[in-house]
Image (spheres, rainbow, N blue to C red):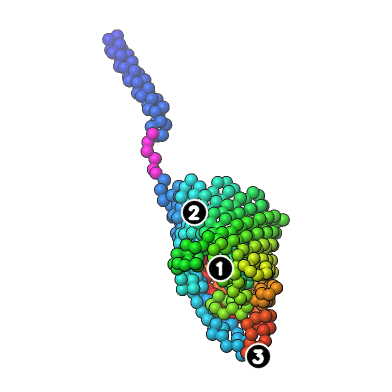
């Protein structure tokens, strides 16, 4: 190779090396820029709306939710007629106990809501209808709501041990009312306090005059304190409540304290007071409950002191005690001061038969006090509750009711007993 050819070859090699260095520099710059470019690249957006299934559709969008709610309860019942008593409310009866439809959800910013309409007794009424605001352990509720009356009253009717609640809850006219309440939960302690007017039906101006809705200026103050310690697998519940109500201008309207023969489809009232002109009511009660594995139980006592216009002040009382046991490997839920609905561990169709529960209850009601003789009732009740799937229950109840001072039989007797058989299917979602 000549000197000229060698020089030309060296020039070509130098040119190639320069081009290679430039190419390496470009690749290096691109590698450094790629993370930033990747970060800047648009990412696939997360779904804005998520749908869950919890017995019915529940729609979730960030901190906003909406869930459809509904309830169906249908009863077929029988009450034996004592002696020769002729009462069209006894014997066989059936009804749709409740048909309820509504929704609940969260609005964001700690606000929530619930709206439910219920068809019962051939009329449509508002039930839970309120707006809530939650901040940590504090919950404020404004609207139509329960008044913290008792454990049995606050426990849902589709998660109770029996078809109907304790006799005193109906006899003392426990019901939802329009008002403002607050509850605060700290550890095992729950405190509840509210001020209420009256139920929305009584407040409606459907009839004018002295008893019209626009004449209703009554109000009440209701409070409840609950402590729920837990020892190993055993959950305990201790509670007490106090309620004071001033009836205001509607004190001129008659008030009666009375009770059906357990089942709701019978409109008969074999015990009950006469019409009373009530100015104020003061009631107070104590609560106990427990859950331990398959076992659960509850007991309550409640007293009602009635201040009358132009009469003595009677005091009525009621109480119950119950014990229950799951024949299947299930347990009764408990949270936030009340019992919840059972979710079977082995539901029907998935290797099991669902949850099977056997409950016993003694229920007492005394409507005798001074010159007011409303009678007494001792009820001995047993219930078999089958929950094949979550949200669906079948309830079979039997009871023997022992009366004293009740509606007289044709032969004049006011002390007698009768048998009650109740059945219900219920769907709650």
Report the label total.
3
Q: Residues within 10 Å of mark 1 (few under 14, many from 20)?
A: some
Q: Is residue 174 visible?
A: yes
| Residue under the point 42% across and 31% down | 35
Relative depth, front residue between 127 and 220: 220
From what the image shows, is residue 369 above or below residue 220? below
On residue 411, the disc is: 3
- Residue 239 point in image, percent of width and height: 67, 59
Q: Residues within 10 Å of mark 2 (few under 14, many from 20)?
A: many
Q: Magenta: predominant secondary structure element?
A: loop
Q: Is residue 34 above or below residue 169?
A: above
Task: Tell me whether the residue at label 3 lies in contact with that at label 1, contact meaning CB atoms closer than 8 angstroms.
Answer: no
**How far from the left and from the top, in percent, is residue 199?**
52, 63
Nearest to N terminus: mark 1 or mark 2: 2
The answer to which of 406 and 161 lies nearer the viewer is 406
> What separation in Å lies between label 2 and label 3 (alpha carbons)?
55 Å
Image position of 72 (left or right of 8): right
Q: Nearer the viewer, residue 349 or 131?
A: 131
**Between tags 1 and 2, which lies in front?**
1
Q: Position of residue 111 (x, y in %)?
A: 49, 49
Reply yes or no: does residue 100 show up in magenta.
no
Neighbour class for label 3 at 10 Å: few (<14), some, many (≥20)?
few
Task: Tell me if label 2 and label 3 are in contact, CB under 8 Å.
Answer: no
Badge 2 or badge 3: first in the primary sequence: 2
What is the spatial separation of the Cα atoms under label 1 and label 2, in whole angstroms?
33 Å
> Disc 3 on helix, strand or loop?
loop
- Is residue 164 visible in the rendered image? The answer is no
Q: Secondary structure at mark 2?
A: strand
Real-space CA distance between mark 3 and mark 1, rounded to the nearest whole angstrom? 36 Å
Tell me where the magenta segment starts and ends, as one range.
Answer: 40-45
The residue shown at (60%, 86%) is: 81
Q: Which residue is mark 1?
A: 252
């Amino acid at each position: 190779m000549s000197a000229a050819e060698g020089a030309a070859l060296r020039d070509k090699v130098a040119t190639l090396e320069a081009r290679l260095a430039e190419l390496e520099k470009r690749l290096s710059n691109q590698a450094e820029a790629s993370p930033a470019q990747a970060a800047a690249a648009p990412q696939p957006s997360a779904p804005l709306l998520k749908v869950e299934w919890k017995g019915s559709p529940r729609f979730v969008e960030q901190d906003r939710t909406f869930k459809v709610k509904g309830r169906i309860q249908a009863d077929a019942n029988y009450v034996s007629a004592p002696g020769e008593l002729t009462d069209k409310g006894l014997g066989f009866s059936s009804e749709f106990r409740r048909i309820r439809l509504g929704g609940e959800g969260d609005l964001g910013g700690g606000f929530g809501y619930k709206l439910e309409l219920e068809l019962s007794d051939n009329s449509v009424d508002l039930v839970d209808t309120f707006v809530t605001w939650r901040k940590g352990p504090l919950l404020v509720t404004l609207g139509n709501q329960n008044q913290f009356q008792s454990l049995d009253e606050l426990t849902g009717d589709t998660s109770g041990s029996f078809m109907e609640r304790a006799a005193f809850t109906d006899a003392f006219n426990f019901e939802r009312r329009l008002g403002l309440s607050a509850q605060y939960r700290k550890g095992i302690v729950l405190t509840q306090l509210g001020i209420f007017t009256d139920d929305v039906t009584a407040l409606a101006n459907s009839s004018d005059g002295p008893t019209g809705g626009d004449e209703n200026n009554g109000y009440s103050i209701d409070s409840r304190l609950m402590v729920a310690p837990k020892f190993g697998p055993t959950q305990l519940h201790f509670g007490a409540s106090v309620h004071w109500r001033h009836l205001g201008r509607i004190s001129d309207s008659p008030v009666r304290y009375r009770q059906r023969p357990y089942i709701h489809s019978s409109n008969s009232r074999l015990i009950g007071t006469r019409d009373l002109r009530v100015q104020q009511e003061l009631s107070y009660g104590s609560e106990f409950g427990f859950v331990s594995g398959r076992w659960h139980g509850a007991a309550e006592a409640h007293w009602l002191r009635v201040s009358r216009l132009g009469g003595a002040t009677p005091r009525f009382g009621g109480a119950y005690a119950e014990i229950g046991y799951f024949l299947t490997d299930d347990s009764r839920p408990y949270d936030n001061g009340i019992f919840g609905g059972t979710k079977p561990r082995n539901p029907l169709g998935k290797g099991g038969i669902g949850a099977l529960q056997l409950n016993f209850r003694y229920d007492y009601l005394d409507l005798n006090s001074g010159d007011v003789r409303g009678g007494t009732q001792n009820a001995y009740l047993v219930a078999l509750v089958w929950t094949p799937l979550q949200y669906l229950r079948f309830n079979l109840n039997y009871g023997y009711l022992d009366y004293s001072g009740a509606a007289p039989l044709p032969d004049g007797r006011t002390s007698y007993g009768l048998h009650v058989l109740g059945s219900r299917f219920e769907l709650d979602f």
